[in-house]
Amino acid sequence: MWRFLYPVSPVFVFARSAGERQLARELGADWAGDSEASPPEPCSAIIDTTPAWRPVLAALERLQPGGRLVINAIRKEAGDREVMAGLSYDRHLWMEKELKSVANVTRADVQADSRQ
């Protein structure tokens, strides 16, 4: 779908496992690397689907000025929460970078949860 809507936009995939990176390349990603790797150019948008905090800081560093990081995870684990103390305005937020969270639950999920 992304290729159809934005055919000239490069697609970069960050993944922890070599198998996931290989699959991304097979599916047409222009580049695939580890969560801490630097892509060939800064990203205009990144979607984080991980349960960890470390990739959030790494993603913010890889955004271009005015870029957007969207966190799409139901919840983040507490195990590496302390890395967020390393958030640096200059490195992670300066130049109008945007951080947005979205709830990846459906209206039916919320309704079912409220009935219990």
Image: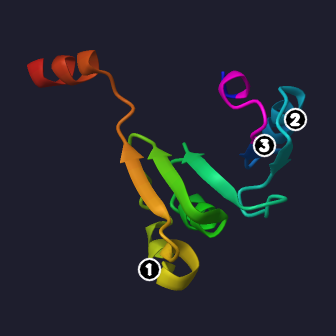
| Residue 50 x %, y % | 55, 47
On the image, which quarter does residue 61 sit in?
Answer: bottom right
Residue visible at 21% across and 24% down in the picture = 110
Tell me: residue 18, above or below residue 39: above
Where on the picture, by quarter, is residue 24? top right
Which portion, as a residue range, is magenta?
Answer: 3-11
In terms of secondary structure, where does tag 1 sit?
helix
* Mark whose residue sits in front, 3 or 2: 3
Q: Name which residue type carries label 3.
A: Pro
Does the magenta stretch mainly form a helix, a strand or a loop? loop
Residue indicated by mark 2 = 25
How crowded is the residue under tag 2: few (<14 C-alpha within 10 Å), some, or many (20+)? some
Q: Secondary structure at mark 2?
A: helix
95 on left or right of 110: right
Which residue was labeled with disc 1?
A: 85
Dot 1 or dot 2, earlier in sequence: 2
Point out residue 5 in the picture as x, y percentages from the top left corner: 65, 25
Quick check: 88 above or below 2? below
Question: Could you say where residue 28 lies in the image, as x and y percent from the top left?
Answer: 85, 30
At x 55% / y 47%, what residue is drawn?
48
Q: Which residue is mark 3?
A: 10
63 horizontally vs 20: left or right: left
Q: Is residue 21 magenta?
A: no
Q: Nearer the viewer, residue 109 or 29?
A: 29
Marks 3 and 2, how far apart at CA: 12 Å
First-in-chain label (3 vs 2): 3
Q: Nearer the viewer, residue 31 or 79?
A: 31
Discs 3, 2 touching: Cβ within 8 Å: no
**Three-letter amino acid code of the residue under disc 1:** Ala
Quadrant where the C terminus is found in the figure: top left
